[in-house]
Image (cartoon, rainbow, N blue to C red):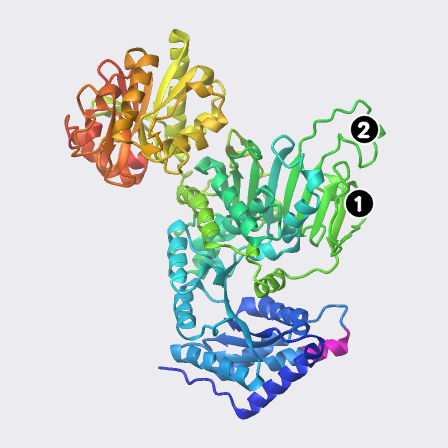
Amino acid sequence: MLAEPFNWHPGMWNMLIVAMCLAFLGCLQAQELQGHVSIILLGATGDLAKKYLWQGLFQLYLDEAGRGHSFSFHGAALTAPRQGQELMAKALESLSCPKDMAPSHCAEHKDQFLQLSQYRQLKTAEDYQALNKDIKAQLQHTGLREAGRIFYFSVPPFAYEDIARNINSSCRPGPGAWLRVVLEKPFGHDHFSARQLATELGTFFQEEEMYRVDHYLGKQAVAQILPFRDQNRKALDGLWNRHHVERVEIIMKETVDAEGRTGFYEEYGVIRDVLQNHLTEVLTLVAMELPHNVSSAEAVLRHKLQVFQALRGLQRGSAIVGQYQSYSEQVRRELQKPDSFHSLTPTFAAVLVHIDNLRWEGVPFILMSGKALDERVGYARILFKNQACCVQSEKHWAAAQSQCLPRQLVFHIGHGDLGSPAVLVSRNLFRPSLPSSWKEMEGPPGLRLFGSPLSDYYAYSPVQERDAHSVLLSHIFHGRKDFFITTENLLASWDFWTPLLESLAHKAPRLYPGGAENGRLLDFEFSSGRLFFSQQQPEQLVPGPGPAPMPSDFQVLRAKYRESPLVSAWSEELISKLANDIEATAVRAVRRFGQFHLALSGGSSPVALFQQLATAHYGFPWAHTHLWLVDERCVPLSDPESNFQGLQAHLLQHVRIPYYNIHPMPVHLQQRLCAEEDQGAQIYAREISALVANSSFDLVLLGMGADGHTASLFPQSPTGLDGEQLVVLTTSPSQPHRRMSLSLPLINRAKKVAVLVMGRMKREITTLVSRVGHEPKKWPISGVLPHSGQLVWYMDYDAFLG
């Protein structure tokens, strides 16, 4: 049933026109009007609107009405007009003015704002058409030029598509006016859903029209990170790097639990709710290369994207998760789950992140958040290495200035013992420069922060505190895109987080009682790229008759597969076992022959292995190791699709291997890719023959595709399966089609071949290949059997058991 369109009565028109004339008489005298802006708040009677958005819009009006723009505010929802108007009026009762504004002026501005604010029902396509008609009629009556329209989506994401379609079809502003559409998180649940949502929105809006809000970017301490780095560029240039930074902590702790929000939390959990967005955004601001002009939105967004591109992939060992003990009971009660239900959703998480670039290589970034913790606080803390050695005893150290005291820079986001946003800089670091909107602060006597008294810091707080949504609404109005999440950066973030989320989906979190009773239960440590709890779990993880089995409880399984040795385990244990076996093989080869020749496959499966070798195998004889490629895509070596590029990103840049021991495949010669006349395959074969005794690699690492291919040897294609050629050009069924590959005869000359097979997607081909004989033309992997060497299969339980 269609709702009745909202009727604008003549009396209401007159009231609105009078209010607009009164509101802008002053600015008509001061300057020429720059145009009219219509702001439509969808979900105008919801919690977010009542708590933050109406106040933010009122602050925007106070800031901008006297600077040449006129405004009208349309509160919209699905609620019928009369009830909606009542709810909106109630929300507007709590509007407040800045403390320094005289009460009479405040009352005057509030009255003007209320007269400019109208409720309307937006439920059908006709409702949107009526809104557009009314905005145009209003402009015609007042004689104002339209500057633009802002649609703020304070509604659930499932409603986005219909609203977007209606705006695009019947509510766009006229020529010369801008459209800005504001979206609130969540922006998807994983990479796939985020891309799907982005594609849907992209059919209705241009990228420059969309403003995805992460309210953390409006928090004053967070918004100050780039300006602070820019204003103190001279002091920070020599310090802001791996040589001087010990670690970075980005923290958001909450004392409240998820009661009343378990429906949302069961779907998202703490990593999706906080780490993937708020804390990751802070990380990019701390870690990005500082643009020459930090006011350039394009430069800032480009540099943030570069951080995402340099993030090292996360493994399950990169994170620890917990859950407060009463959470499952709350879920059962609120979502009517059976008594036997026990949630695996984490309410606490800490993640160790590394950035693989020259500035931050080796520096741990720790992201942590949780509910039902001992305090409410948020901060980004940069802890600098202390390389001083003081001869005098501590009692003789210069107060707050000694180089032996901790050196740190803290962007205190809010709450905690300070109770407000702040920037803290150790006095033994440098005296910072901040804009006039920040002032030096004094805290209560005896206050200690991060192990030091407040007096040991240069401490600054905002002259006037502002709510994050108020700050962001101002940036939306002024078109500052650098304070918002672009589609490209959003998908880059989900691309980084989704593999970890999938790996943790079935991991039982550590239970904790909540609040001060947590004690040291959630304390953690990090080493060799892994996080782990400092204390053993004192209670069982899942209620039941006995302790719940964990992946680490399962021993590595040794068996036979296709008459060859099989090693099977959970993925982490399997990668650890394979890395240990490769190192042992390398040590033996170097001891006997003085060198180790290792041929590595590309793709996604060996990435975790490369990272394990790079971060946890300090005894590996890299100086005596020659690295070869099993196969390569016919793209430039710098292309992200290149197997060599993957090897470079995840292994080579982290180990000390002589550059002359690295042998990429020559797919790019004479400015051409894999041209037969360039004889790249023959060149690589000659290089192998010259350097590898009997062309017999010490170890070849292979994978197995879902179609049974290995290296770049594909079913129904005879190239490389037999004959005398050591290296061949082949054709793949997927892009890029052209490939270079070691041939099956060359692979079978190896002293040892390891086949790594991981993931549930490989279960079907694993079962099939276990039953077939020697049929390399149908299943090239079935042709792998070293003539005088050893073949070992490494399969995780997902691939082996399903």
Identify the residue shown where x is 26% and y is 15%: 789
Cβ atoms under marks 1 and 2 closer than 8 Å:
no
Q: How many marks?
A: 2
Identity, as a three-letter code, of the amino acid under mark 2: Glu
* Horizontal arrangement in the rendering, residue 566 relative to residue 606 (left or right): left
Q: Quadrant of residue 452?
A: top right
Mark nearest the camera among 1 and 2 is 2
Name the residue carrying label 1: 446
Compared with residue 727, is residue 384 higher up or lower down, i.e. above or below? below
* Horizontal arrangement in the rendering, residue 508 relative to residue 378 (left or right): left
Magenta span main SS: helix
The N terminus, quarter of image: bottom left
User: Which circle marks residue 790 in the picture?
Assistant: none
The C terminus, quarter of image: top left
Identify the residue shown where x is 49% and y is 39%: 310
Give the image location of residue 602, x and y in percent.
Answer: 35, 31
Give the image location of residue 354, x and y in percent.
Answer: 52, 36
Magenta-highlighted residues: 102-109
Identity, as a three-letter code, of the amino acid under mark 1: Gly
Front-most of 38 and 765?
38
Q: Quadrant of residue 67?
A: bottom right
Give the image location of residue 339, x and y in percent.
Answer: 40, 54
Give the image location of residue 751, x and y in percent.
Answer: 29, 15
Q: Residues within 10 Å of mark 1 (few under 14, many from 20)?
A: few
Identify the residue shown where x is 23% and y is 18%: 786
Q: Of marks 1 and 2, which one's residue comes earlier in the chain?
A: 2
Q: Residues within 10 Å of mark 2 (few under 14, many from 20)?
A: few
**Secondary structure of residue under mark 1:** loop
Name the residue carrying label 2: 394
